[in-house]
Image: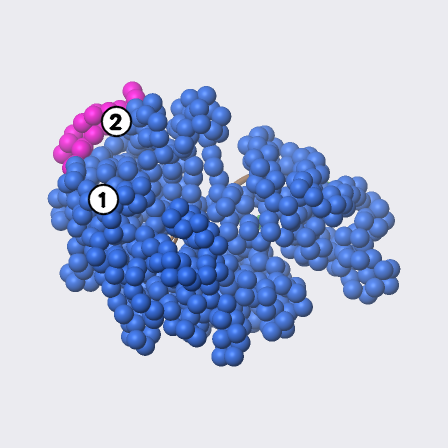
Chain colours: A blue, B brown, C green
Amino acid sequence: MDLAAATPLNDAQRAAAGFGDGPLLVVAGAGTGKTRVIEERAAHLLERGVAPERILLMTFTRRAAAEMLERTARRHPQARRVDGGTFHHVAYRIVGRHHRALGLARPPTVIDPDDAANAIAAVMERLGLGRDRRRRLPRKQALQAAFSRATNLRLPLAEVVARDLPEFAGEVEALQRLRRAWAGYKLERGYVDYDDVLVMAAKVLEAPEARDRIAAAWSYVLVDEYQDVNAWQAELALRLSAPHGNLMVVGDPRQSIYGFRGARHDKIVAFADEVPGASVLHLTDNYRSTQAILDAANAVMGLMEDGGHARPLRAAARPAGGRPRLRVVEDERAAADVVADALQERLAEPGALAGHAVLVRNAYQSVPLQGELLRRRIPFAVYGGLRFTEAAHVKDVLAGLRVLHNAFDELAWLRLLQLLEGVGETTAARAFADFSDADALAATGDADPLARAVRRAPLMAGRIREGLVDLVTALRDAAGAVSGGGAHSVAGAYDRLLTWYGPVLARRFPGEGQRALDLAFFRIVVERYEALDALLADLALDPDATRQATSAPGAESGEGLRPLTISTIHSAKGLEWDHVVLLGVDDRSLPSPWAVRRALATGDAREIEEEKRLLYVAITRARQRLDVVHALYGRQGMQRLSRFLDDPGVRATLDVDLGGGRGGPGDGPAAGLSPDELLDALAGE
DNA sequence: TACATGAGGCTTTTT
DNA sequence: GCCTCATGTA
């Protein structure tokens, strides 16, 4: 970012930023400053006197939107008031505000895929689909994923099942029934999952009059990362800009890496055809990386099916630089050591650590490195993979907060009740049915299920009474703290819930101290909120606000060092570092076995293409230096280097180091392997 | 009947 | 780590 800010705009960028009104597509390769073009465009509009609230900026992560606005605000303080956020946030705002048009009594509660899967399991049970031994249905997450895919791709469920769950093709009818019942379950209880948010927003915007009324709030719509929109998101952007046509979308089809969740990278290709009067601009000058890094990226681009037509990236600002280095080491431990050694050497330089990122295909591939960094007290922050708020213990406490927010939140209640000793699914369901029984509530005048639970708990059958009383007492106290209002009310409620949860935690996860520390850490997040609904909405729609930050900054070698970044390649999209290390680029990870299997089985190589793009994204994150560290042995034995890196054209852009240096401290069976053997391994024998 | 517990299987990527 | 399934227990 620093560099981009220092470089004057080139002609193409200036043309894009200052482009007149009307639909505009900017096709911008990696590192060509496309984000900067959007910032510039926003600044331009503000200079023309457009009110900031009338500009709508949509991206995929809130962090990206916030950073863009923050940088723009340095030139134009008003930029902070530009409206924007993720597609899901914008969609949820529309749904929340217009819930009555959808026949909903109140703004819905957002549930995450994990809750959605649990709800599906509950509905399955209710339909009697779970009990039948003869008919086996997919597991709940697989069901949730299939339903979600069908929605995002706008495909009939049968097609998704045929493709993703072929062994259940005979059960399509039951699955359709289940999907319908599940939709009913959500509507009844006022839940929406991530997909529903987009679908409902589209529904609200369907009628032209309503659409124009809602869209009138903005005069300009700016969209980043357009290559990753799915059909619903593209529609959202188009509908919100329909009245004025001032829609600017920016993206790079070669960085489309979210096909698995319905991204349609053909949408960006088709934009000019689908949107009447759209102009198209191309950016190819790269301001981020050295030419040596771009050579590798271009070589990977050459592997793509349409690679021949692509314009190669040119370094417009950096010197040639050194070639990316491919380093082969014995195993994952050795890889972790090599990376940690290199980082340790730079600890003394202020800020150097934060200029590094380690990128992986799968979140678990960074685990050995995390262990080594912890041991050496090198601070790091992890992005991607299991998010903090998805950990079981965090969800437990959050369930408590959710009940305070909405005492009718069945999923939250069930989760809490099942934490009690002697309470399983059945008892929990019965208890909630009792607490939330509408007739009983009306008869006794209890305001909500919590009030009724407080009265009922002491009367329950012996075995679970004690635990139940503890729980509802804690909830009641916490509810009292919240209703008291004030700066610390949410944190106060959280503390009360933690007091209750402590013993539960000890019983549920014996001997795991980290989880208690997590919850203490999480309080820092909670403290920032004065209102419970804001906290819960943020957590539901934007879990990355609380991504796990590990390796306590208090570690004494740390001294407030800004941490190294460890990230999945997906989560690294749009970001850049001086020095990037790619870990785990073996042929069983990139391309992923799923993509390979599908290509072999059906001849459909689209997912393989996406894996190439993923590697392209990873390489182009680096400004000055790129290292690839390949371990010869992984958890599944010997592993070849990724076929993409092994391609002669790509290999030629790399410096190959077969582990002549350190292989890892002391434990060097690497020394037992001859260079020839290593070569054979590299070439896949 | 409902819950607890342990073995075994599987695990991509994310809003 | 997480889910499912089978088996033992109140």
**Mark 2 burial class by Cα count in 10 Å: few <14, some 14-19, many 20+:** many
- In the picture, the quarter occupied by the C terminus of chain A is top left
Mark 1 lies on a secondary structure that is: loop
Residue A193: x percent and y percent?
Answer: 54, 61
- Residue under circle 1? A289
- Residue under circle 2? A663
Q: Nearer the viewer, mark 1 or mark 2?
A: 1
Task: Write the residue at 30% across / 24% down.
Answer: A345
Q: Toward the viewer: A42 or A477?
A: A42
Is residue A132 visible to us here?
Answer: no
Residue C4: x percent and y percent?
Answer: 54, 53
What chain does mark 1 sit on?
Answer: A
Residue A521: x percent and y percent?
Answer: 56, 35
Q: Toward the viewer: A407 or A563?
A: A563
Looking at the rendering, the stretch of residues picked out in magenta corresponds to: A655-676
Task: Write the residue at 38% across / 61% down.
Answer: A48
Mark 2 lies on a secondary structure that is: loop
Name the residue type under label 1.
Answer: Ser
Task: Write the residue at 30% across / 61% down.
Answer: A18
